[in-house]
Image (cartoon, grey):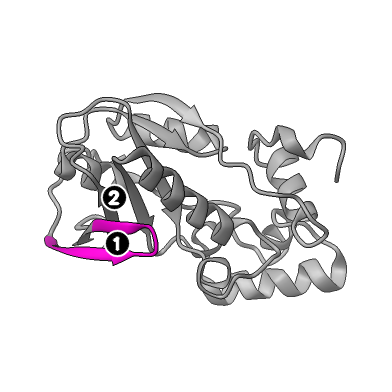
């Protein structure tokens, strides 16, 4: 495997960005390894700090932009921004090219058809199309966190694999902060699959699913 831990970002542009939760610094960058353009929203000045609150968020157009209810992605994005704003210091890294855990938008919509018409879950609907379950790479997040100068992070995530991925890319993760969203009729099947098939820590599901 190619070691990308010390790869510098190819292009970086920074500006102020005022949001519904106040001012952030927007750090747009093109990653030389995956070729995608990503964005980090920075609150406060985390350079050199330890235990910085960080969310590494995978792009989900249907959930993040259009508020689709079959997943909790959009809700998690909003909650993460709120948590970082409330903390007064932190980073949200928005990774593009991660649609459908890396299979792309067209393929993701095709999995939705199988979920709706055949009752397959988010895992089996991907494999039924001959697609991998998860091909995301979190190296770009690690590289921008080093560019920003973050010492160590508390990761807003329910996914222990994401902790391991950042650790493998040289980021020290000192803790994982749950990001639990309400369960309803629209997302319960998706969340149950994430818990039972993908190992996400979702204790609020209880016996549902």
The residue under label 2 is: 140
Q: CA distance from mark 2 to mark 1?
A: 8 Å
Tell whether position 187 is magenta: no
Q: Which residues are magenta?
A: 11-24
Q: Position of residue 135 (x, y in %)?
A: 49, 52
- Identify which residue, 148 or 24, lies in the foreground: 24
Look at the image and tell me whether residue 36 can be seen.
no
The residue under label 1 is: 38
Look at the image and tell me whether residue 94 can be seen.
yes
Q: Residues within 10 Å of mark 1 (few under 14, many from 20)?
A: many
Q: Please count the marks in the image.
A: 2
Instruction: State yes or no: discs 2 and 1 in contact (Cβ < 8 Å).
Output: yes
Specify the quadrant of the image occupied by residue 131.
bottom right
Please, what is the dominant secondary structure of the magenta stretch?
Answer: strand
Lower position in the chain sequence, tag 2 or tag 1? 1
Q: Position of residue 36 (x, y in %)?
A: 29, 65
């Amino acid at each position: 495997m190619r070691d990308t831990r010390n790869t510098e970002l190819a292009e970086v542009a920074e500006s102020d960005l005022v949001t519904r939760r106040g001012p952030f610094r927007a750090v747009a960058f093109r990653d030389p390894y995956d070729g995608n353009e990503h964005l980090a929203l920075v609150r406060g000045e985390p350079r050199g700090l330890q235990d910085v609150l960080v969310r590494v968020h995978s792009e989900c157009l249907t959930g993040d932009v259009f508020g689709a209810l079959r997943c909790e992605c959009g809700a998690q994005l909003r909650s993460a921004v709120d948590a970082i704003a409330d903390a007064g210091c932190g980073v949200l890294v928005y990774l593009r090219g991660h649609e459908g855990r890396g299979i792309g938008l067209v393929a993701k919509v095709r999995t939705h058809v199988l979920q709706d018409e055949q009752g397959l879950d988010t895992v089996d609907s991907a494999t039924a199309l001959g697609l991998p379950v998860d091909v995301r790479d979190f190296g770009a997040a690690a590289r921008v966190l080093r560019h920003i100068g973050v010492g160590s992070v508390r990761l807003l995530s329910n996914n222990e694999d994401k902790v391991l991925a950042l650790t493998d890319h040289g980021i020290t993760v000192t803790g994982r902060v749950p990001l639990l969203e309400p369960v309803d009729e629209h997302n319960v099947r998706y969340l149950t699959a994430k818990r039972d098939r993908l190992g996400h820590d979702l204790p609020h599901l209880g016996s549902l699913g």
